[in-house]
Amino acid sequence: MAQAQTSKDEPDSAAGLVLPHIAAMAGYVPGEQPADGAIVKLNTNENPYPPSPAVRAAIEAACENLELYPDPSAREVRACAAELYGVDADGVLVGNGSDELLSILVRSIVAPGAAVAYPSPTYSLYDTLVEIRGARAQRVAWGPDHALPVELEAAPARLIFICNPNAPSGTIVSTDRIEAFARKREDAVVVVDEAYVDFADQNALSLVGRLPNVVVLRTLSKSYSLAGLRVGLALTSPGLAAQLHKVRDSYNVSRIAQAGALAALRDQPTMRAHVEQVRRTRARLRDELETLGFEVAPSHTNFVLARRPEENLAGLATALRERRVLVRYFTALPDALRVTVGTDAAIDAFLDALRDIGFSS
């Protein structure tokens, strides 16, 4: 039987099959993943260096038992993370990337129609997760020099996200300030999203367990070079972790991902060596961009935010793409481009493209 053809000009009839707020939302737009391997890819904050050699061996070994379900709670990964970070293993959750853990937190804590608060601009997935839940996003503008806004202390929300270091600015809030904030907001769960923290000089691990309303999120996508495996960690008090486990999907992290994560966590020297290389390249990239007339805030991540105040840089992003260099442009920050710290060769190609476009010292 021939299938009916649907014209692109006709209304999307599928929209009527889902909840109205889902039909109305745009959805999260991840960074472009081009099929062309010749493109210089500086748009999604991936680590340009390979993961620990032990990861491949661990994954190959895990392939021998693919007919079996994985450990549902990833006990070995939780125990390893607990020892590494000095926290209670009963307070550790493992997720399909820290993005899944963010979703678990929203579903566990936020009722439809309730508020989720966070400084803005920040990681745009927060907006999407709030929309999916049918909740309300309460965005509070960052203070001067990206200080944690005082207004956030009065936000009527039971869930508060603090991306630290922040994306896309690359800036960081001190642990002392976060602790003071979390103590004032004992009525809320304060999530410190530390996806990029291994590239910084401080973290909020000292708050885990000591403040029962604090959750620290980590990901193996950035510093451990495992973006393709999708493994994240939530570190919190055992009591809160027990509640979040109820919402976690069963077998949410594959056998292969657990094996790779365990091998990566056990090889700290490889991760640290790559982090230090990224930090060196980051410093050079910032200096070069400033020489070319950009304003670049000190970054504590594996990317920099390059700005030209009062200019719209959408055209520059397009011009770079025409020269086979991808960076990230955000309509919410029209005067800025976010540039991942790639290899030195990739950064050289990016800088050469800028000079070809007309930027000069």
Image: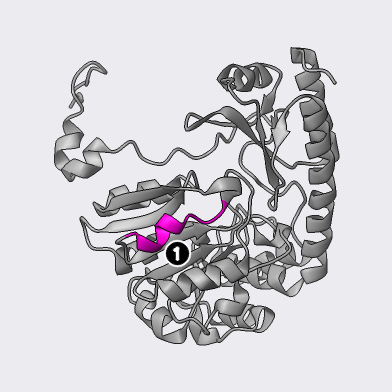
Category of crowding for the residue at label 1, using alpha-carbon neighbours closer than 10 angstroms: few (below 14), some (14–19), many (at least 20):
many
Observer-nearest of 314 and 251: 314
Q: In which quarter of the image is the N terminus?
A: top left
Return the x and y of residue 89 as percentages of the image width and height.
55, 85
Measuring 45% from the left and 44% from the top, which residue is drawn there? 124
Q: Which image quadrant is residue 116 in?
A: bottom left
Measuring 46% from the left and 76% from the top, which residue is drawn there? 183
Check disc 1 and report the residue beneath it. Answer: 101
Q: Does the magenta stretch include residue 350?
A: no
Residue 69 seen anywhere in this rendered image of the structure: no
Measuring 74% from the left and 42% from the top, which residue is drawn there? 341
Q: Does the magenta stretch include residue 154?
A: yes
SS state under label 1: helix
Measuring 60% from the left and 59% from the top, which residue is drawn there? 173
Residue 328 seen anywhere in this rendered image of the structure: yes
Observer-nearest of 87 and 148: 148
- Name the outermost residue toward the left: 16
Return the x and y of residue 155 as percentages of the image width and height.
34, 59
Q: Is residue 156 above or below residue 325?
A: below
Q: In this view, does 129 lie above or below 40?
A: below
Q: In this view, does 270 lie to the left or right of 308?
A: right
Observer-nearest of 227 and 59: 227
Magenta part of the protein: which range? 147-155
**Amino acid on which the number 1 mark rests in the picture:** Leu
Q: Is residue 266 above or below residue 288?
A: below
Q: In this view, does 73 lie above or below 329?
A: below
Return the x and y of residue 73 as percentages of the image width and height.
47, 78
